[in-house]
Image: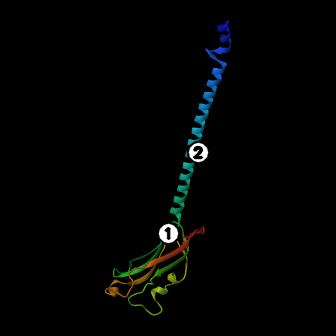
Amino acid sequence: CENQHMGADAFWGLSATAWTGIYTLLTAGLFAVAVVAALYAKRQWESARDQIEEMRKAELEGRRPYVIVTVEPSKVSRHLFDLVVRNIGQRPAEIVSISLDPPPVRAHETDGHELTNAKMLKEPVAIIAPRQEMRAFYDSYIERNGRDDLPTTHRVRLSYQDSSGHEY
């Protein structure tokens, strides 16, 4: 009679309580797998979001204006050099303010035409287009030779903005 009673309540030799336990363990296992999968998916989503943000920043950085100030040999003579302001970026630079410390001084200044009074050093430049440059005659290597009273380096202060109003 016991064998018949066990056979009526059992499936594959396991009681209903055993099957409930197995079902509970399987459900818990599936839940654990789902939680791990959700955490992995969240991490992947965050990583993708961060990569997209980095790509966006890199794209903006690559398309912004880049204004540089250099002293370069003149195109007129190898004995002369120019103060050059150039936008090497991909967008126009607006409201460009430039200052040099100490102020630039030529070996032989002409009254009323001192380099330090050049308009690009006194007033903001409205716009410098991409790949545009502004040049001003700075001095002669020959005339500066041996002069210790003239500055040889300058600290450049430069500020400008792009057409979206971002300041640099």
Task: Tell me residue 65's x, y (percent).
Answer: 52, 68
Q: Label 2 belongs to which residue?
A: 42
* 4 with respect to 74 (left or right): right
- Marked residue nearer the N-terminal end (1 or 2): 2
**Residue 15 occupies quadrant:** top right
Task: Tell me residue 102's x, y (percent).
Answer: 44, 83
For the residue labelled by badge 1, is the local secondary structure a helix, a strand or a loop?
Answer: loop
Tell me the residue at 68%/11% (across/down).
8
Q: Quadrant of the N terminus?
A: top right
Q: Nearer the viewer, mark 1 or mark 2?
A: 2
In terms of depth relative to the viewer, which is nearer, 137 or 2? Answer: 2
Relative to residue 134, is residue 111 depicted above or below?
below
In terms of depth relative to the viewer, which is nearer, 71 or 127? Answer: 71
In terms of depth relative to the viewer, which is nearer, 101 or 78? Answer: 101
* 119 with respect to 17 (left or right): left
Relative to residue 46, is residue 22 depicted above or below?
above
Q: Label 1 belongs to which residue?
A: 66
Task: Tell me residue 131's x, y (percent).
Answer: 48, 70
- Of all residues, the one furthest to the top in this rendering is 1
Name the disc covering residue 132, or none: none
| Disc 2 crowd, CA 10 A, few/some/many (<14, 14-19, 20+) | few
- Of all residues, the one furthest to the left in this rendering is 146
For the residue labelled by badge 2, is the local secondary structure a helix, a strand or a loop?
Answer: helix
**Residue 93 occupies quadrant:** bottom right
Kind of residue sitting beneath label 2: Lys
Tell me the residue at 57%/38% (across/down).
36
| Disc 1 crowd, CA 10 A, few/some/many (<14, 14-19, 20+) | many
Kind of residue sitting beneath label 1: Tyr
